Amino acid sequence: MLVEEFDFAPATDEIQSHAEELREQILMNLSRRTGIKTIENAGEGSKTTYRIRGRLRVSGTKARINMSMVLCEAGETLFSRNYDGDISDIFEFGDQIAAKINADLRIQINAYDANRLEALADDELSVSELRSRAARNFYRATYSSWQRGLALMERAVELVPDDPMALAMRAVGEVMLHAASYEPMAPERLMQLEEGLNLAIKQAPKVDFLYSARSNLHGLIKGDADAALRDAEYALKLNPTYLIGFGALASAMILKNDLLGAIERLEYSMTLSNDDPLEAERTFPLAICYVLTGQFDKAKKVAEALAHANMDNRILQKLLGMVLRKLGDEGGAARQEKLAENLAFAPSIQSIRVLLPEEHAAFADELYSMARV
């Protein structure tokens, strides 16, 4: 990936310095990604797949950076977006904008890598190509697409049993499917996945995704809050803008009953990308945290959005009913609860089971009882 020098206006030394600083931050963030080679100029060697372009414009304290990602071979612009901010504090501006750009580029690169393989059959794909196809299925965020993604990762592990990313993606798929179905994981499968993650981290100890994957195994399946917290914190140490890392960290903090801390991380993660296909994975826990901290108006807003987007989701309809009852809307709560009762439970990535501490067992029992068929 080539990150070109940024254009800037007005053409002053100060604005040029700001543009160079922002480019350096983006280069640093991208260089942390496994599987991406980042270069600063076209003379550094090999053919590049993507070209990143940027233009910074400043008026007073207002700044706008336009970022685009171009497919080098075809010259096609795959992604373009404006990012606005206040440049009076260049360091804060740079941190905020670079974080958003990094999150968006990560999603766009994964999406395109999968699209270019569309015509190939599974048995024609390499392990890295299988990973791209699985990522695309995970991004579709349905239970069946996650099942498809997991099957692809099982094939990848069969081909290369010690591939770190395949081992981690297999674990993530299995964890999410069990959390979505509210079913316990067989001990032997849990051991297999944990051993695979330990091997993956031993081989690639600086990859954020591996630690977030192990964190979710600890936090969503094993209920080990301390282990989940350690791994999530390390994933974010490696990459402070990592969306999946924030979700893993929030799950661990919820399990430790640090609900306000979880809210802070989840709310911040929502500001990092406008295109995150897995946002609901963090939205449902956020709604739960709002309820458990007495922030019922915020809980209603989030729960309504989730329920209206997933009308056939029994868990989400029940959650909205519980929120309405907390707000004193008995009629609305009764209607929602009746709606939930008339729905059949179906596993959904939009409402994965978040393990709660003992202090909130009654809430968990009421909400999660809707997962019974």
Image: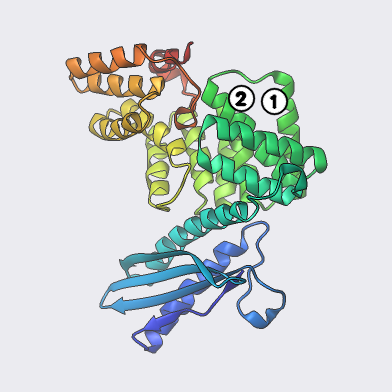
Secondary element at image label 1: helix
* Residue 222's disc number: 2
Within-10-Å neighbours for mark 2: few <14, some 14–19, many 20+: some
Q: Amino acid at mark 1?
A: Leu
| Distance (Cα) linking label 1 and label 2 | 9 Å
Q: Residue at x 30, y 14 (%)?
A: 337
Q: Residue at x 42, y 67 (%)?
A: 94
Sequence order check, earlier mark of 1 and 2: 1
- Residue marked by disc 1: 190
Q: Position of residue 167 (x, y in %)?
A: 72, 40
Colour scheme:
rainbow
Quadrant (top left/top right/bottom left/bottom right) for the N terminus: bottom right
Q: Amino acid at mark 2?
A: Lys
Within-10-Å neighbours for mark 1: few <14, some 14–19, many 20+: some
Frontmost residue, 81 versus 364 = 81
Residue 114 seen in this snapshot: yes
Frontmost residue, 259 versus 167 = 167
- Contact? badges 1 and 2 (CB < 8 Å): yes
Q: Residue furthest bottom?
A: 12
* Residue 80's disc number: none
Q: Position of residue 86 (x, y in %)?
A: 30, 68
